[in-house]
Amino acid sequence: MRLLLVRHGRTAHNVDRLLDTAYPGAPLDETGHEQARGLAQRLADHPLDAIYVSDLIRTQQTAAPLAQLRGLAPRIRGGIREIQAGDYEMSPDWSGYVTTILGWGQDPHLRMPGGETLVEVLARFDEVVAEAHGEGHDTVALVSHGAMLRTWTVARARNLTPEFVRSAPIDNTIVIDIEGEPGQGWHVHRWGDRTP
């Protein structure tokens, strides 16, 4: 099974560096809409069986041009929503949020203040991936969020080195091309324009 893990397009909160993780979240700005149209063109000829999006509006808006072009109805799943910022929601200071996520390398049960643990985060994303796999899809686009995509991919892919992860971008509408099966492990073929 191949997953095309896509980060949503740009929002005003991205520009302002605000931790926007709660429902429904900010919509795309004009640049974000342009990025979404560009994404549809980049994936126009790529095999694609289904599109999954989070329940935050920016992922749905990002997927809309691709879904229309391919004649697919996006499936909305809260399980691929961004890692919840909890007490840090809408803060311009990311230090506590990032420190907690980095701390998950030592303790996956460490709880984001007012939010989730790594175990909970991975379980909800894994559930959506398992659903897509169970449907028998060969290639699926999952439009999700930066911290979530980086965290899940690093936890599940077998071929990423710490050096690669440290320098890997997570720009708006980046596509991470990853192949594997739930429970069997995953291999990243491309991370944007990079090869691990």
Image (cartoon, rainbow, N blue to C red):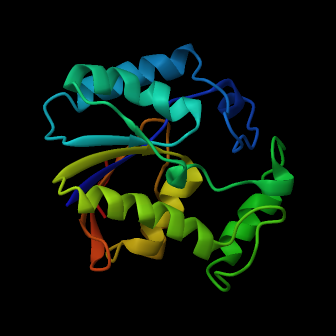
User: Residue, x 68% and y 39% (percent of image)?
Assistant: 23
Q: In this view, does 190 lie to the left or right of 10?
A: left
Residue 179 appears in which quarter of the rendering? bottom left
**180 is higher (above) or lower (below) than 88:** below
Q: Where is residue 112 in the image (x, y as percent from the top left)?
A: 77, 66
Q: In this view, does 32 lie to the left or right of 128?
A: right
**8 is higher (above) or lower (below) than 79:** above
Viewer-proximal residue among 146 and 63: 63
Viewer-proximal residue among 181 and 88: 181
Q: Is residue 91 left or right of residue 98?
A: right
User: Residue, x 26% and y 61% (percent of image)?
Assistant: 133
For residue 178, say whether it is visible.
Answer: no
The quadrant of the rendering that contains the N terminus is bottom left
Q: Where is residue 8 in the image (x, y as percent from the top left)?
A: 49, 36
User: Residue, x 48% and y 61% (percent of image)?
Assistant: 125
Q: Where is residue 144 in the image (x, y as percent from the top left)?
A: 48, 45
The quadrant of the rendering that contains the C terminus is bottom left
Residue 187 appears in which quarter of the rendering? bottom left
Q: Where is residue 27 in the image (x, y as percent from the top left)?
A: 61, 24
Viewer-proximal residue among 13 and 121: 121
User: Residue, x 68% and y 24% (percent of image)?
Assistant: 12
**150 is higher (above) or lower (below) than 14:** below
For residue 45, say whether it is visible.
Answer: yes
Q: In this view, does 53 lie to the left or right of 91?
A: left
**116 is higher (above) or lower (below) than 44:** below
Viewer-proximal residue among 34 and 180: 180
